[in-house]
Image (cartoon, helix red, strand yellow):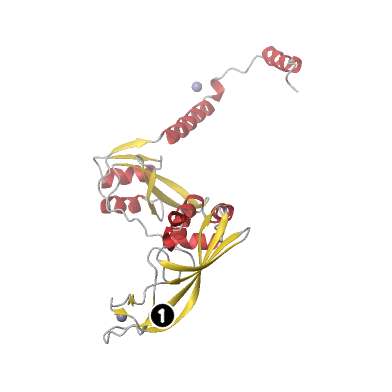
């Protein structure tokens, strides 16, 4: 059972475990006598030194887990290799320069994009994997950018404000999966035209009502069906009705004086009204 929970520690030698109310601390060391140089792949057994790394790990039963791991520095003996020495890594556990285990990193990489900095940090603290908002944001920035080659079959485009009233960008989403596809630096027709030309494949484009988007789709993919989304249709309708009513204000009959009085009286006697 324990080996299932601590599977990622199976390749190191655990020398001590200290448990208190808040944390579970492992002292461990690496097992193999030799390691392969990450630069050239040559296996070396010549130990040059070592040090202890402190790694945060996923929590167990509400307790923080820390691994105090002794690692060794090896000398690379390949003459043509640029690296004189290298530090061994434990696959599935350690990563170069990282102060957390691979499994903790993967977990935080799910939490951070879903919640963003401070809310993600609050959840992480609650899950006993405390991490600062800033380091969560650094994780998000380091995530590989999924750069699409094609547009989604059903694509949505709309603008969003980086700074309301001043700076706007354009976001494109895959309507069928609900996933964001790309973010463009402004909301001009030209920018969207060149994006659509670089990313062919949109058959249906749901767009905001900005005429720039309509023009861009007409120009870059004239065969695509343009759909005004429901939200923008409602806005268009409301604005049209408001404008029409305002223009015809004169044509509307004034409400009769006695009807208005009745309404007021009715409200006054309404037992529910304050
Ligand atoms: Zn080497
Ligand atoms: Zn009228």
Residue 81: name its quadrant: bottom left
Q: Position of residue 4 (x, y in %)?
A: 43, 54
Residue 65: name its quadrant: bottom right
250 displayed left or right of 46: right
Q: Name above or below for residue 43 compared with residue 115.
A: below
Q: Name above or below for residue 15 compared with residue 104.
A: below
Which residue in the rendered view is the most extreme toward the left?
223
Q: Position of residue 95 (x, y in %)?
A: 41, 68
Q: Nearer the viewer, residue 158 or 82?
A: 82
Q: Nearer the viewer, residue 268 or 71?
A: 71
Q: Position of residue 55 (x, y in %)?
A: 50, 67
Q: Position of residue 175 (x, y in %)?
A: 36, 40
Residue at point 41% right, 41% down?
A: 208
* Residue 12 visible in image: yes
Q: Nearer the viewer, residue 46 or 145?
A: 46
Residue 251: name its quadrant: top right
Residue at point 34% right, 55% down?
A: 146
Check disc 1 and report its element: helix, strand or loop: strand
Residue at point 54% right, 28% down?
A: 246
Q: Quarter of the image containing the C terminus?
A: top right
Q: Name above or below for residue 226 compared with residue 36.
A: above
* Residue 102 visible in image: no
220 displayed left or right of 50: left
Total labels: the figure holds 1
Q: Nearer the viewer, residue 101 or 247?
A: 101
120 displayed left or right of 172: right
What residue is shown with label 1? 73
């Amino acid at each position: 059972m324990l080996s299932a929970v601590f599977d990622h520690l199976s390749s190191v030698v655990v020398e001590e475990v200290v448990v208190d109310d808040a944390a579970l601390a492992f002292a461990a060391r690496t097992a193999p006598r030799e390691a392969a140089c990450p630069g050239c792949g040559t296996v070396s057994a010549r130990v040059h030194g070592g040090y202890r790394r402190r790694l945060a790990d996923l929590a167990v039963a509400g307790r923080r887990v820390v691994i105090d791991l002794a690692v060794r520095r090896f000398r690379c003996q390949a003459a043509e290799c640029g690296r004189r020495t290298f530090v061994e890594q434990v696959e599935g556990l350690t990563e170069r320069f990282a102060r957390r285990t691979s499994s903790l990193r993967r977990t935080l990489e799910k939490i951070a994009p879903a919640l963003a900095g401070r809310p993600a940090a609050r959840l992480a603290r609650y899950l006993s994997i405390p991490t600062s908002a800033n380091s969560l944001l650094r994780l998000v920035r380091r995530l590989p950018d999924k750069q699409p080659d094609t547009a989604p079959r059903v694509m949505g485009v709309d603008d969003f404000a980086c700074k309301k009233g001043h700076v706007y960008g354009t976001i494109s989403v895959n309507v069928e999966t609900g996933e964001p596809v790309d973010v463009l630096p402004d909301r001009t027709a030209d920018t969207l035209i060149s994006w659509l030309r670089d990313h062919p494949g949109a058959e249906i484009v749901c767009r905001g009502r900005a005429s720039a988007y309509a023009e861009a789709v007409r120009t870059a993919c004239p065969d695509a069906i343009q759909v005004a989304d429901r939200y923008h249709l409602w806005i268009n309708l409301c604005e049209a009705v408001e404008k029409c009513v305002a223009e015809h204000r004169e044509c509307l009959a004034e409400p009769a004086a006695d009807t208005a009085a009745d309404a007021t009286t009715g409200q006054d006697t309404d037992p529910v009204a304050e």
